Image (spheres, rainbow, N blue to C red):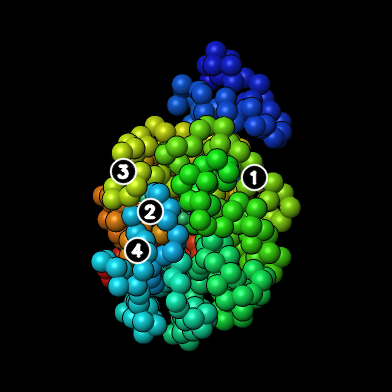
């Protein structure tokens, strides 16, 4: 491999990684130029194994999108409907949302992941009650809810500071923030694809404040549309800089763009090779972030499985309900049993570990597989 890396001009980077030195912006751009996918994967896998060996994490979770009414007009989105009453729009009553949890009383769920549209008319109490109700039904469930974009929207709509919104949600049961809404941090891209939602500095500051209150969070990156390799690396470096400051990020999650039914539908979806490359470069650039996740709904199950040798150590979870990707053309199922997840991890030669949201181990690799029926 040393000869191959030298021939590719990557020997210096390999040495830096060996010495525990950080890769620079230029290094990141060069990695995206590397034509040899397996050499790139080899480097990323080495970093993955330093941190996690063959361990590969997943969780028993449920995804919930309580409303798709959204005042933002992101070009990549197939899920949002502008106004209540528009064709295809929906808003769950609190009882309907809580029923999603009640219906799964027999499942060993550890997490609810909520992402919503930016609804102009719901009162703040809707969100506070949503959280309180979930905790009433299952006090031990981890609530990973509302992207930083939603937090900023609540602050503007209800006339509060971002900090107060976070504090009130936290008091109602919020445990951590998911990584959605990050898209691409470069202003050029944000102006074009999501001009009317919270900007990069505020997005990162909301994560900073959440970390200051003891909450953990994730950051995503939507790739495979109009962004350049340099803009991808810039996104990773802004994420790395925040993590240097706070240490509160758990996972970085590249999200493959899906072009069906949205305003960027003329673009082709990213190829499998590009997906593997983005996950590998993420692992190499983000030396201070513990986990790189392949969200299997976004990458597809097969690419997620291969990504376990390209820097990825986490696959998200059982999911069970997913609208954002399926309205944008995803052909993956909406749910995977833990037995199916464990099988695909083992088939890739890795060790499946069920975790909770904070990466505490629930079920080790040697435990017997127990198939729990999912609800869809
Ligand atoms: O922010 C929307 C993306 C995100 C499309 O934190 C699209 O653990 C591709 O953030 N094609 C929501 N992507 C999902 C998300 C997420 C997923 C899994 C785990 C975690 C986590 C977070 O979905 C949005 C947006 O970036 N998205 N439309 C589309 N057409």
Q: For residue 350, which quarter of the picture? A: top left
Question: SS of the residue at dot 2?
Answer: loop
At horizontal 51% and vertical 83% (from top left) the residue drawn is: 125
Q: Position of residue 149 (x, y in %)?
A: 54, 61
Mark 1 vs mark 4, CA separation in Å: 31 Å
Label 1, on which residue?
Answer: 238
Q: Is label 4 in contact with label 2 (beta carbons under 8 Å)? A: no
Ranked by sequence position, the earlier of labels 3 and 2 is 2
Residue 94 in the image: above or below residue 152: below
User: Looking at the picture, does residue 258 appear above or below residue 280?
Assistant: below
Q: Secondary structure at mark 4?
A: loop
Badge number at residue 265: 3
Task: Give me the C-alpha separation between circle 3 and circle 1.
Answer: 28 Å
Find disc 2 in the rendering and name its residue: 77
Q: Is residue 145 left or right of residue 370?
A: right
Q: Are marks 3 and 1 in contact (CB under 8 Å)?
A: no
Element carrying mark 3: loop
Tags 1 and 2 touching, CB below 8 Å: no
Ligand 1 - quadrant of the structure image: bottom left
What residue sits right under mark 4 in the picture?
81
How many circles with numbers are drawn on the protein?
Answer: 4
Residue 212 vs 223, above or below: the answer is below
Mark nearer the viewer, 4 or 2: 4
Does mark 2 have its CB less than 8 Å from ligand 1?
yes
Disc number lying in front (1 or 4): 4
Q: From where the camera sits, is residue 241 visible?
A: yes
For marks 4 and 3, the one nearer the N-term is 4
Q: Residue at x 45, y 72 (%)?
A: 120
């Amino acid at each position: 491999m040393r000869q191959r890396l030298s021939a590719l001009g990557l020997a210096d980077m390999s040495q830096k990684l060996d010495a525990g030195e950080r890769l620079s912006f230029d290094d990141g751009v060069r990695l995206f130029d590397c034509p040899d996918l397996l050499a790139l994967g080899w480097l990323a896998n080495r970093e993955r194994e330093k941190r996690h060996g063959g361990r590969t994490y997943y969780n028993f979770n449920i995804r919930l999108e309580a409303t798709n009414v959204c005042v933002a007009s992101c070009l990549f989105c197939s899920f949002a409907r502008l106004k209540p009453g528009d064709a295809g729009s929906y808003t769950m009553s609190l009882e309907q949302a809580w029923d999603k949890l009640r219906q799964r009383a027999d499942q060993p769920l550890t997490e609810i992941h909520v992402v919503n549209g930016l609804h102009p008319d719901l009162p703040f109490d809707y969100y506070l009650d949503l959280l309180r109700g979930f905790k009433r039904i299952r006090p031990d469930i981890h609530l990973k809810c509302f992207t930083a974009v939603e937090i900023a929207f609540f602050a503007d709509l209800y006339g509060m500071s971002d900090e107060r919104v976070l504090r009130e949600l936290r008091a109602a049961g919020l445990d951590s923030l998911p990584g959605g809404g990050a898209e691409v941090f470069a202003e050029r891209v944000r102006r074009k694809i999501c001009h009317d939602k919270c900007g990069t500095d505020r997005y990162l500051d909301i994560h900073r404040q959440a970390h200051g209150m003891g909450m953990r969070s994730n950051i995503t990156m939507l790739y495979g549309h109009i962004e350049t390799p340099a803009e991808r690396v810039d996104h990773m470096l802004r994420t790395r800089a925040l993590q240097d400051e706070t240490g509160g990020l758990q996972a970085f999650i590249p999200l493959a763009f899906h072009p069906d039914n949205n305003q960027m539908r003329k673009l082709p979806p990213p190829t499998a090779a590009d997906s593997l490359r983005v996950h590998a470069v993420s692992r190499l650039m983000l030396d201070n972030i513990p986990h790189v996740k392949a969200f299997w709904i976004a990458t597809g199950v097969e690419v997620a499985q291969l990504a376990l040798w390209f820097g990825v150590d986490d696959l998200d979870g059982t999911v069970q309900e997913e609208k954002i990707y399926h309205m944008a053309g995803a052909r993956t199922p909406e749910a995977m049993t833990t037995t199916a997840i464990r099988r695909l991890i083992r088939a890739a030669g890795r060790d499946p570990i069920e975790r909770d949201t904070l990466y505490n181990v629930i079920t080790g690799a040697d435990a017997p597989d127990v198939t729990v029926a999912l609800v869809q």
